[in-house]
Image (cartoon, rainbow, N blue to C red):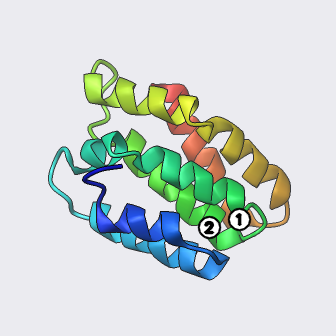
Amino acid sequence: MGNAPSELVEIRAARTPEAAAVGLEHLLDLFDGAKKGTRAAVAAAGGIKVVVAAMTAHLHTAAIQQSGCQALQAFLQEVFAPKDPAQVVNGAMVAKAGGIKAVVAAMRAHRGSAEVQAECCKTLSIICDW
C-alpha cells in the first residue's frame, strides 16, 4: 500500500476488534471536512479493501460494522454526481472489494441492531444510486 495514510496502516495492523474500531474512527475523522480528493486518494491507496477486510474480520462487532458502513458511504460520496468519474471508480471499487457482501453480512449478523441496520441501508442506497 505504499503511501497509505496512517489510518489505513492502523486498521490493517489491528489485532483486536477494539483496535480496528479505533482505526475506523480515525479514518472517519480524516474524512470529516477533508478537502476534495482525499477520499479518492485513500481509496486508491487500498482504503476500501482495508475497510471491507476489517468488517469481514470483525463481523460480530457492531461498532465496526457501523463505522465500516460510514466509511464506505464516505468513499461513495466523494463528489456525488451521477456522471462523476471519481464516483464511478469508487463505487466499482466497493463492489469489487466485496463491500456489498460485507454490508449484507453485517445486516444478517446484527438483525437486532437498529443502528447497524440503518447504516447498512444507507450504504446500499448510495451504492444503488451510482
Q: Residue at x 30, y 55 (%)?
A: 4
**Which residue is under mark 2?**
64
Q: Residues within 10 Å of mark 1 (few under 14, many from 20)?
A: many
Q: For the C terminus, which image quadrant?
A: top left
Q: Foreground: 11 or 71?
A: 11
**Which residue is under mark 1?**
58
State the residue lying farthest toward the left: 35
The amino acid marked with disc number 1 is His
Return the x and y of residue 32 as percentages of the image width and height.
Answer: 28, 65
Q: Residue at x 74, y 54 (%)?
A: 106
On screen, 62 above or below 98? below
On screen, 16 above or below 7? below
Q: Residue at x 64, y 57 (%)?
A: 55
Count the marks.
Answer: 2
State the residue lying farthest toward the front: 2
Return the x and y of residue 78 as percentages of the image width and height.
Answer: 30, 42
On screen, 51 above or below 67? above
**Direction from residue 48 to residue 112 in the image, left or right:** right
Gap between marks 1 and 2 measured at Cα = 7 Å
Return the x and y of residue 110 as percentages of the image width and height.
Answer: 80, 61
Circle 1 or circle 2, nearest the eye = 1
**Direction from residue 71 to residue 15 in the image, left or right:** right
